[in-house]
Image (cartoon, helix red, strand yellow):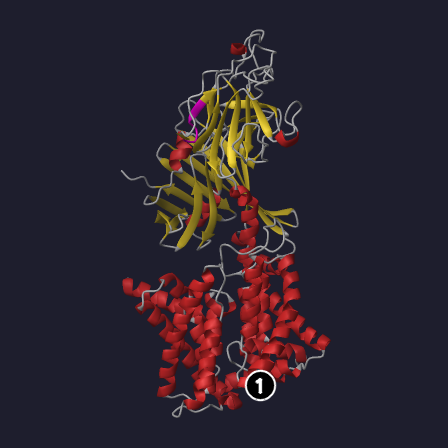
Amino acid sequence: MKIKKELKAFLNGLINSYSQIFFSNNKVFGTLLLIVSFFDIWSGVAGMLAVVSSNVFAYALGFDRYKIEKGTYAYNGLLTGLGVGLYFQPSVELFFIIIFISLLILFLNVSFEAWLGKYRLPFLSIPFLIGIWIIDLSGSSFLNIWLSDRSIYFVNSIYGLGGNSLVNLYNWWNEIPFIYSLKVYFLSLGAIFFQYNVFAGILISIGILIYSRIAFSLSLLGFYTAYYFYSFIGADLTELSHTYIGFNFILTAISLGGFFLVPNKYSYIWTLLILPLVVLITLASMELFARFNLAIYALPFNMIVIVFLYSIKLRIPKKTGLKEVITQHYSPEKNLYFFNNASRRFGELQYISLSLPVNGMWDISQGHNGTYTHKGEWQHAWDFVIRDRNGLEYKNDGDYPEDYYCYDKNVLAPADGYVQEVFSGIADNIIGDMNLINNWGNTIIIKHVEYLYTKFSHLKEGSILVKNGDFVRKGQVIAKVGNSGRSPYPHLHFQIQATPYIGSKTLDYPFARYISIEKDGKHNLHLFEKPKQDQKIGNIQSNSIIRNALHFLPGKTLEFEIRRNEAVEQEEWEIKADTYNNSYIYCSKTNSYAYFFSDENLLYFKNFVGNNKSALFHFYLAFYKIQTGYYQDMMVYDSIPANQIFGKSRLFFQDFIAPFYMYLRSNYSLKMHSIDNELMPSEIQLISQIDNFAFEKRIDSFSYSITLDGKGIKEIVYKRKNETIIAKQIYSI
């Protein structure tokens, strides 16, 4: 098993080295590129020798196996091997040169990765440029190695690869009366793999189309923008077909338009603006390098991409415009769909999670920009009170502080932090009176991180349980609600601020999550929102059955009996965490990963990688987002990336226009359906549903019926058309 695993990893590293040149890890695309590289057999052999040498050296030196398998350390060696193999006659001496230059390029790979990686910049094909230039400059000294003329007799190479059938196919393609610019486009694509013919370019363009519709459209955009700029400035268009340097424009467009930057209208606009610069750099560098009898290869592409990416890192952050890809999915479509969905779901995660500073259900008597005192620099604050069913804040006649439901109730720390300031010794007011001298009354200020403080005012005299410098935990009781300061009736004034002083101006900052009860009695879940005046809200009160069923700790295993129609099988999943503390569920049987986040109140899945027909994928959809409290008939809503739900045929046209308009969307909803006993529950039923839309019209729906009990996840039932899947958890004894 270990040998098989190592062999698979090595083959992945081989194939990915080819697809990496186009910023991909698509195996079909990589295999197609490998085949194209063998249109000149010896060039293909030299390229593969370079890949194998690079990866063997990387394994031997103990470099990151993940990066080896991704092709990171070998694609530059591949490019050099292809070029050397094409330009020189095959010989034992040449193969030794390729092995040693591959070692040098590996060192350059690692060095440039470390150097540019400090600035989160790619090293692209800089190691290839250095390696091929070394060969070009030293080639005249190779007395036992001769230049090749095989590129002149390309048809002979084609015949050796595939016989008359391939030659006839090649001739058929060449006889097609291509538009001149389109022919140059295909020649430019083929030149990336040192294959200077239209046939290779056509196959590569088909591979790009299969791999990514966005990358395909960007390749055309990049090439034709440069092509017409050549014409506009009066440059010699024949240079594009004779020197094959058009691939610089193609790679620049793909990399900036959809790989390193999230593809959107801004990335396309800036790609259009950048490409004339690539043309100018191309013309200037060709003139300069001709004096040394050197080709420029991919120099313009490397220069402009690295300089541009570095420049935009120095911007003042903006909410719109160019967005860098943070989590690289090696596909412009996946980068886009994941980014858009993550922005909708997790855009507020930039905030430190703050809980409500009280237990139970409370009312907001005054919210932001309130009716009475929340004005100007102090407008972003809340006043918390408790009201009964009749809307009253007190019992009896409300003549005494003790009559008010909120008086003497616990005040909680909303997050971990250090007590920055305590102001106490202010007597509670009699009802209707106010202390305008000590405006804020008894007050506590807690520092959570730099420039994030929370302030609690009008606290009960003598109730403060902390002192300056104390460290407090989230949910810890720190005081009681009172009626001190400018407070005519008992309430808790709470605000968030950037500075540690009493009287500091407020921040417009949300609570991480809370439950609201609407006037019709329905419960709603709010994530990173700001409560409004007269809203009844409370922290999520976890239900033990839901919490225990979804308590996924690294090292824990989940075993299920999976029944698909009549077939029955068992699957075991393991809870793991990677080096970046990303938690995920892994199914070795289907090689699938479901990444999730969870805390005491909420579980949501962040991403799925693997087999979309696996039981784990259905588990991922069924529990896409769920809070751990049970509130009858409460609905939880979310959205799912289109590429994880819709098939390739539906996505094909969507992919082309996805940077500008999304007409496909998939919505998730979960309903708290039933509980057998609210006081001592033993079983809870939930229903989650996926609704798919095209142009705002619902085209498909399917649902999951979920049963939880005291042991865990009792059953999940999925039905869709003629397919039924029933998953039952197998509990360990």
Tell me: 690 left or right of 127: right
Looking at the figure, which quarter contains the N terminus? Answer: bottom left
Q: Is residue 457 above or below residue 673?
A: above
Q: Quadrant of the C terminus?
A: top left
Which residue type does callout 1 highlight?
A: Asn
- Furthest residue to the left? 733
Q: Nearer the viewer, residue 121 or 499?
A: 499
The x, y position of residue 128, in whole percent, is 46, 75
Give how far across and how far down residue 435 sits, in percent: 59, 15
Q: Is residue 513 left or right of residue 242?
A: left
Give how far across and how far down residue 458 sits, in percent: 54, 20
Q: Is residue 219 above or below residue 45?
A: above
Nearer to the camera, 5 or 368: 368
Is disc 1 surrounded by few (<14), some (14 to 19) or many (20+) residues within 10 Å? few
What segment carries the magenta color? 472-478
Identify the residue shown where x is 44% and y is 87%: 139
Report the number of discs.
1
Q: Secondary structure at mark 1?
A: helix
- Residue annotated with mark 1: 171
